[in-house]
Amino acid sequence: QKHVGILAMEIYFPRTCVQQEALEVHDGASKGKYTIGLGQDCMAFCSELEDVISMSLTAVTSLLEKYGIDPNQIGRLEVGSETVIDKSKSIKTFLMQIFEGCGNTDIEGVDSTNACYGGTAALFNCVNWVESSSWDGRYGIVVCTDSAVYADGPARPTGGAAAIAMLIGPNAPIAFESKCRASHMSHAYDFYKPNLASEYPVVDGKLSQTCYLMALDSCYKRFCDRFEKLEGKPFSICDAESFVFHSPYNKLVQKSFSRLYFNDFLRNASSVEEPAKEKLAPFSALTGDESYQSRDLEKASQQAAKNLYDMKVQPTTLLPKQVGNMYTASLYAAFASLIHNKHSSLVGKRVIIFSYGSGLTATMFSLRIRDGQHPFTLSNIATVMNVSEKLKSRQEVAPEKFVETLKLMEHRYGGKDFVTTKDTSLLAPGTFYLTEVDSMYRRTYAKK
Ligand code: ACO
C-alpha cells in the first residue's frame, strides 16, 4: 500500500474546564507558576457524566458521521489509554456498540497501555496492519482517550481530558515515512499507577522530566542516523516544517525543542547559526547528566532556538495549553492544533512527532503531508475538528467546583450501584454520557 497514514481526525474534550490562573489563586501557588512556569492556560476535566468510554464513543461516532464513513467499512479498531476502568474488558469492546448495530462484528484490535504512549502503539498497529498481508482493504480507526487527574499537590494543574479518533488507510493526506522512526525504551519509575484502588498516579515529577528529555535525545540521535543512511545527507531541524511533542505541560515542550537545537549544535548541523554557536560553545563539553541539570544551558539554548520554536512548534501548542495533559491524546491534540493553525500551508512538508510514555517508552517518527481527496484533506479535517468553536463553547467552573468533582470521582472510582445526575445541560448535542453503573458494575451510556 502507498502513503499509509491518517485520513481523517476528530477530537472531543469535555466542556467543563478550570482556568489555570484561578487555580493558582485557589492552590496558594505564586502568581504565574501554572501559566508561565508550566506554560498552561486552562484545563478540561470530566464531570461525573463523562469518562474515557463516553468520550471515545462521542469521538468515534462523530468521526464516522462527519466523514460519511459506513461502520461496515471498518476492519480494525485500536484504543490507546492509560485510564483503567476495567482490568480485563477493553475500552474497544465498549466501542463495538457503535458497529454491532450495523451488523459489523468483524473488527480486529484491542487496547494498548503504557502511560501516554498507548495511542502511538495503537497507531503503529493500525498502520502496520494496512501495510501488511493481512489487510482486508477496510479502514482502521485509532482512538486515544484519557482523563488525567492527579492527587492534590504540584502535579494537579497538569491534568486534562480528551479523546481523539483517527481514520487510517492508504493514500492518506498525512502519510507515514515508515522507515524513518527511532525508539528508546527502558525501565524507570518516573510515573506509574501501582495503586489499583485509585485513579491517581504515583509521580516523581523531576525524574519524569529528565527521563523525557533523555528519551528525546536518544530518539533524536537514532532518528538522525537513520535519516542520514536513507537520504544520504544529515538531518537538521530545518528538514522539517514542524515538531510535535507529547505535551504534559507546555514548559516541557519548550525545553524539548531547545534540546533538539542543542543536539543540532553538537552535531554541527546547518540549522545552528554563528551567533548561536558562540552562545552554546561553553556547554559543548558537558556530560549528558550535567547537561540535564544545567539551568544556564537551558536558558541559552531556549534563547537561541526561540525563533525556530515560534515557527515550528508554537502552532502545535494551542490545544495542549487550553485542555491540559490528555495523556495518550496529548500528542495527537498537539498535531490537531497544527492542522487547525496551518492546514493551508503544510502540503509537501515533513512533520516530526515525538511520543513519550513514562515507565518508559518513546518513539520519534516522521509524517509527510500530501494533497488529499475530499473528504480526506487537511482543510476538511480542520473544518470537522472545529477547534475554535469547541474551545469557545466551554464552560469555565470555579476551582472549588473542580476539586469537589474530583472528590466525588475518587469516591466513585471502582464503585457500583449508582446513577449519575440527570442534568446534561452542559453537554453538546451528540455527546455520550454515563447514566448508570449497576450492582454488577455494568456501565450504561446514553447519547444526548
Ligand atoms: N512565575 C513563573 N514561573 C514560575 C513561578 C512563578 N511564580 N513559580 C515557579 N515557576 C517555574 C519554575 O521555575 C519551574 O520552571 P523551570 O522548570 O523552567 O525551572 C516551573 O515553574 C515549575 O515549577 P516547579 O517548582 O518545578 O514545580 P513543581 O515541582 O511544584 O511541579 C511538575 C512541576 C514537576 C511538572 C509537576 O507539575 C508534576 O509532577 N507534573 C506531572 C509530571 C509530568 O507531567 N511529567 C512529564 C512527563 S510524564 C507525563 O507525561 C505524565
Image (cartoon, helix red, strand yellow):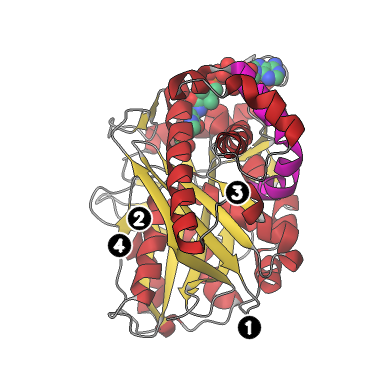
Tell me which numbered mark, 2 or 4, is placed earlier along the sequence: 4
**Pointer 2: what residue?**
443
- Mark 1 C-beta closer than 8 Å to ligand 1: no
Q: What amino acid type should be assigned to the residue bearing mark 4?
A: Val
- Main secondary structure found in the magenta portion: helix
**Pointer 4: what residue?**
110
- In this view of the protein, can residue 51 be seen by the observer? no
Q: Quadrant of the N terminus?
A: bottom left
Q: CA distance from mark 2 to mark 3?
A: 50 Å
**In the image, residue 4 lies in the stretch drawn in magenta:** no
The answer to whether the residues at label 2 and label 3 have Cβ atoms under 8 Å apart is no
Q: Which residues are magenta?
A: 295-319
Q: Position of residue 60 (x, y in %)?
A: 49, 67
Residue in view at x 50 percent, y 76 percent: 3
Q: Position of residue 98 (x, y in %)?
A: 42, 73
Nearer the observer: mark 4 or 3; the answer is 3
- Residue 373 disc label: 1
